[in-house]
Image (cartoon, rainbow, N blue to C red):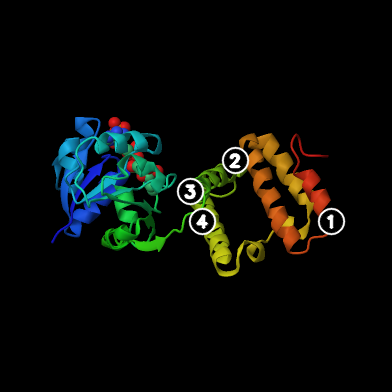
Amino acid sequence: MAIRLAIVGPGRVGQALGRRWVEQGVDLLGFVGRRPETVAAAVRFCGAGASLTPMAAAQAHVLVFAVGDPDLAPAIGTMAGASPRSCSLWLHTSGRHDEHVFVAVRGHGIRTGALHPVAPFPDALSGWRALERMPAVLSGDAAARRLLERLAILLGMTPLWSTGGDRVLYHAACALAANGLTALRSLVDQVFAVAGGLPPAAAAEVAAALMHAALRACDQRGAAAALSGPVLRGDAATLRAHRTALEAHCPAADPAYRALMRQALELARSRGLGDAVAQAVAATLAGGAPPA
Ligand SMILES: NC(=O)c1ccc[n+]([C@@H]2O[C@H](COP(=O)([O-])OP(=O)(O)OC[C@H]3O[C@@H](n4cnc5c(N)ncnc54)[C@H](OP(=O)(O)O)[C@@H]3O)[C@@H](O)[C@H]2O)c1
């Protein structure tokens, strides 16, 4: 029998997951949203479903909360007041929250869990395209496990079970990995553009080649073994030259450069960089203008 599912939050994630589930034969009843035009866009994007009242959505077998993190607890509170169907599964897609956010439905006979789609959703279409083989980090009641896993597999994602831990720190790590890397790439592009000497397409090729190779090396050998470059060599003079040039031409890149190279210094120390050299490197990376 098809899973009858409703989604609270017709945004990027709600639309992307909804469309993939519909393609896989899930019976999408529709969306609960704050604005009719957003709900209508979500229904069009998924090719199924309708605008739902909280009361209608609360009768679904699976209720998915895909609202922004600050809106999650209030949205659950609203749905809890809408005569929810017992034995249903309520899940959210938030990276920041764990199951405690479902406290309002404890005692209603509802199973609860989280399905965090670990993929970027800059818009619904890109998110829908990015789902295949990406991890879905799951957590939830024992009675919810099989259904959560099935929902992840229907999305084409790889289910990974979380055993708890600090959810806010977990989310910070996800943000660093995804948004941090995106921000780093934009800085790299800016510095190449100001440096000149390479047409934009060639600069983009160099940036992509280096970043992909660094990530591959981290995957294969771990971050410390993957480190190369002036910090590993203890080359304070080159680091000073970089900082002087950045200060003069790309001052916005200097704080990120220093922060990242300080982390690289920790890796270099773990690889055996001597104390005296490490201290010289650290002095070069301290705040303020680069030492002469
Ligand atoms: N974006 C990502 O890359 C990503 C990745 C993994 C997980 N997530 C998680 O997925 C969740 C949704 O993220 P998103 O990027 O899809 O956010 P989004 O595009 O801002 O969509 C959230 C939607 O929820 C609606 N909404 C808010 N409160 C509501 C309520 N009480 N009832 C009904 N609808 C409500 C919003 O309405 P309005 O249109 O009126 O604002 C909006 O349409 C977040 O928890 C986020 O952490 C996001």
Residue pointed to by mark 3: 167
Q: In this view, does 153 lie to the left or right of 183?
A: left
Q: In this view, does 227 lie to the left or right of 43?
A: right
Which of disc 4 and disc 3 is earlier in sequence? 3
Residue pointed to by mark 1: 275
Q: Mark 1 and 4 residues: CB-CB less than 8 Å, in contact?
A: no
Q: In this view, does 46 lie to the left or right of 199?
A: left
Q: Which mark is residue 208?
A: 4
**Residue at image x 73%, y 64%?**
271
* Mark 3 neighbour density, 10 Å: few (under 14) some (14–19) many (20 or more): some
Q: How far apart are marks 1 and 3 (CA)?
A: 36 Å
Q: How far apart are marks 2 and 4 (CA)?
A: 17 Å
Q: Which mark is residue 194?
A: 2
User: In the rendered image, is residue 141 in sight?
Assistant: yes
Residue 162 position within the rendered picture, expressed as x and y whole percent measured from the top left: 44, 58
**Residue at image x 54%, y 51%?**
203
Q: Nearer the viewer, residue 241 or 78?
A: 78
Q: Nearer the viewer, residue 33 or 220?
A: 33
Determine whether the residue tagged by mark 3 lies in a helix, strand or loop.
helix
* Mark 4 neighbour density, 10 Å: few (under 14) some (14–19) many (20 or more): some
Residue 200 position within the rendered picture, expressed as x and y whole percent measured from the top left: 50, 47
Determine whether the residue tagged by mark 2 lies in a helix, strand or loop.
helix
Q: In this view, does 56 lie above or below 275?
A: above
Q: Mark 3 and 2 residues: CB-CB less than 8 Å, in contact?
A: no
Q: Quadrant of residue 243?
A: top right
Q: Distance between the residues labelled 3 and 4?
A: 31 Å
Q: Nearer the viewer, residue 186 or 4?
A: 4
Q: How far apart are marks 3 and 2 (CA)?
A: 39 Å
Q: Is residue 161 left or right of residue 252?
A: left
Q: Which amino acid does label 4 sit on?
A: Ala
Q: What residue type is labelled 2?
A: Val
Q: Nearer the viewer, mark 2 or mark 4?
A: 4
